[in-house]
Image (cartoon, grey):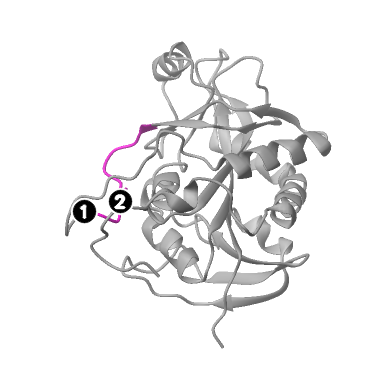
Amino acid sequence: MVMTADIGVIGGSGFYSLLDDAEEIEITTPYGAPSDIITVGRIGGRTVAFVPRHGRDHRFPPHRIPYQANLWALRSLGVRQVIAPSAVGSLRAEYGPGTLVIPDQLVDRTSGRAQTYYDAGGAVHVPFADPYCPVGRALAYSRAEAEGWNAVDGGTLVIIEGPRFSTRAESRWFTSNGWSIVGMTGHPEAVLARELALCYTSLSLVTDHDAGVDTGEGVTQEEVFAFFAANSERMRTLVGSVVAELPLDRACPCGEALNGIKLPFELP
């Protein structure tokens, strides 16, 4: 049986409990294996494919996640819309832990990550001025407000290489540029989604104030993991409600990202 899915979710392993009638499927891609076996199930009337971003045992650090394989595998299953929850640090004093930011911009400060499918066979320049799906963003913010989140509509997510956290000087520099939050996994995830003409929406949960906001020792892995785990059920509820209301007929520019471009290979 060929399994298909309407919507993809890329997140932590705690999101497995989102899915009803779940089945596991192994997928091979031209870019290797995804982070783990993909689970396909249902949320309400929608079929959803879930990929644990770091693997079930969190074996992939941010700079080693097989981003290309993850997005390719989702598209090969029929996914055209992706919801991507993640933990981030705040670069603004007013965005405390528990704030949910729905960013509308990103800044790439990574290095060395494979960030394109089109590195041979001819130039493919995808539009990326607005990295996130406007329909997905609007729905996510609306649902977050309705569910009582301290939600922020818009903001810039700066993605660092990791796996270390920022120095205090780096964090203050990010803040001085007007950027809102900092994370390690939002790039190249977003651009690879655009290169496959997928909708991509980030749900960025603030778990801490980054090094430049507070004095003291700065952020630790333990506090990030603990805070995200404590809020995982609430985040699962939000993801479920967003998935349930995403329109299947896309009326956003994301699906047209490759229009008029000659691709060097056929997409799944």
Q: Is residue 150 above or below residue 163?
A: above
Residue lying at 44% horizontally and 61% vertically, measured from the top left? 70
**Mark 1 touching mark 2, by CB under 8 A?**
yes
Residue lying at 74% horizontally and 57% vertically, measured from the top left? 244
SS category of the residue bearing label 2: loop
Compute the Cα span from label 1 to label 2.
6 Å
Question: In the rendered image, which residue does mark 2 sit on?
Answer: 116
Q: Is residue 45 above or below residue 26?
A: above
User: Can you give x and y, in whole percent of width and height, for residue 21 in the image?
Assistant: 73, 76
Of residues 11 and 261, the one drawn nearer to the viewer in this rendering: 261
- Pointer 1 local density, CA inside 10 Å: few below 14, some 14–19, many at least 20: few
**Camera sees residue 227:** no
Residue lying at 23% horizontally and 62% vertically, measured from the top left? 264
Question: In the rendered image, which residue does mark 1 sit on?
Answer: 119
Over which residues does the magenta segment extend?
Answer: 108-118
Kind of residue at disc 2: Thr
Kind of residue at disc 1: Asp
**Camera sees residue 127:** yes
Quadrant of the image containing the N terminus: bottom right
Q: Is residue 138 above or below residue 26?
A: above
